[in-house]
Image: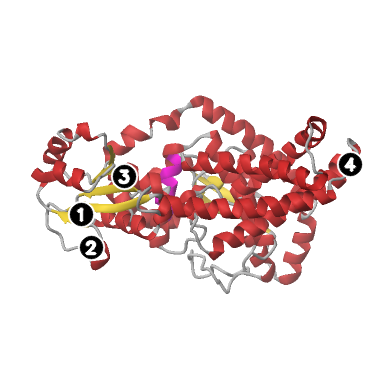
Amino acid sequence: MKKFILLLVDIVLLYASLWLTLLFRYNNVDTELWQKHFWPFSIVFILWIVVFFINGLYEIRKVKNDYKFYGRLVSNLLINTAIAFTFFYIIFDRFSYIRPQKVLIILVLVFAVLWIVWRKLFYIMIASDKLSNNIAIIGVNQESLLLAEEIILKPHLGYKLKLIVNPDNVHLPEKFQIAKTARDLANLKQNLQENHISTVVVVNDAKYGPEVARYLFESLDLKINYFSLTDFYEKITGKIPITSLEKNWFLQNFGQTNNQWFLVIKRIYDIFFASLFGLITLFILPILIIIIKLESKGPIIYKQKRVGLGGKIFYAYKLRSMMHDAEQDGAQWAQKKDKRVTKIGKFMRKTRLDETPQFWNILKGEMSFVGPRPERPEFVETLKKEIPFYNERHLAEPGLTGWAQINFPYGASVADAREKLQYDLFYIKNQSIALDISIILKTINTIFNATMGR
C-alpha cells in the first residue's frame, strides 16, 4: 500500500508540476495548450517513473530519511532531466515542433521542490508514533530478536515495537527494552489492548504453540493482523530466515515452482534477451579479448563447473578476469579486493562483462537470466553441510543475475552464502515475470552505476 501511495502521489505531482509550469510560462492554461503538452510529457513521465523504480525509490524497506536518500533524489532528477532533453530534442524532434526548453527547466525545478518536500513528509509520517503500526512479538529466539532489531532501526518501515511476550523469560539486551515485556500468556488479550497492538508476530515454537493459539483465538475480536515470524520477516526484509524453517514450509510454499506457464514464458524471454544482448556484446568483445591477452597470459574464455537445476553439473563460461595461475592451489573464494584479479578483470567484474559468455549457457537451457547464482561443486558440498536447506536453492534454474545479487552483491564466505541463501529462497517462493523484470532492471542500474564509477 505504501508503495502504491508513493507512486500515485508522484504521478499527481508530475502532472501538477506540468500545469503549474505552463501557468508560470504562459500565464494561462487553456485546453489547447494543455493537450499539446500532455501526451509528449506523459511519455517522459513514464520514463521518469521507470528510472525512479530502477533506482529503488519505491523500496520502503531500503530507503531512509537521511542525506544519502535526498542525494539519490537529486541524482535521479538530473538523470531524468537528461532523458527529457534527449527525448524532445533528438527523438521527438522529428514528430513535433514543440521545443519546451524553458518549460522543461521550470518543470524540473517545480517538481524537484514538490517531490522532495513530499518525500520528506511521507517518511516523517510513516515513522511517527501516531501513524506507526504497533507490533507485538510473541516468543524470543534468534530470529525474533533480528526482526525486533530491524523494526527498531528502520522506523520508516512504519512499524513500532510496543510489546515482547517472553514466555521463557529469556534475557533481553538493553536495546530491546524500549518495548514493554510480558511473560504470562494468560494476560495476552489485555496486553494487546493496552498497547494498542495492530499486528502480532508469532514465533513457531512447539513448546507453547497450542497455548499461544488459544489466547490469540480469544483476541480475534480485536481485529488484529496475525503473522508467523517467517512470513513477517519475509515481508519487511525480502528474505527467508532459514534457521526457523522446517520441511513442511517447503512443501507448503514451493509448489508453485512447477508452474508450467511461467516456465514457458521465462524460457521465451531468456532466448530472446540472450540472443539480443549476445549480438550487442559482439561489438565490444574484440576489444576485451585484445586487452585480456595483452595484460596476462592464458585463455581468453575459460569454463568452470557449476551446479545447476536439480544439482546437475554444467560448465559455465566466463571471460578470464584473473591471472592464469589464480587457482594453482585449488578452488578458493573470490575476495572483495582479490589480488589475483587483473586490471581489466576488475572493470569486467564491476560491469558484469566477464559473464557475457554465459548468454551461451542461457541459450543452451543450462541457465536463465534470473535465478540463484550457480555455485561451484566444491563449495556446494561444503555449504550443504554447513547451511541448512542449502541444496533447496537448486529447485530453481540458476541465473545470470538474481534477487540475492541485487540485495547482497558480494559473497566470499560461508556466512555470506548463508545470507544469500535467504534471498534465494525468497526468490524461489515468489518467482514471477514481474519479479524477474524488476531484478533485470535493477541489475541494469547496478551495471550503469559501476560503469559511471558510482
Q: Residue at x 81, y 47 (%)?
A: 25
Classify residue 11 as left or right of residue 64. Answer: right
Does residue 318 show up? no
- Give the label on residue 177, or none: 2
The residues tagged by marks 2 and 4 sit, at their Cα atoms, a distance apart of: 62 Å
Residue range of the region highlighted in magenta in the rendering: 420-428
Examine the structure image and report whether residue 17 is included in the region drawn in magenta: no
Q: Residue at x 49, y 50 (%)?
A: 122
Pick the front one: 184 or 97 = 97
**Amino acid at circle 1:** Val
Q: Give the percent coordinates (x, y) of residue 327.
A: 54, 67
Decide which of tag 2 and tag 4 comes sooner along the chain: 4
Asked if disc 1 and disc 4 are in contact, CB closer than 8 Å, the reply is no
**Amino acid at circle 4:** Asp
Does residue 121 show up? yes
Q: Which residue is mark 1?
A: 140
Label 2: how many residues lie within 10 Å, few (<14), some (14-19) or many (20+)?
Answer: few
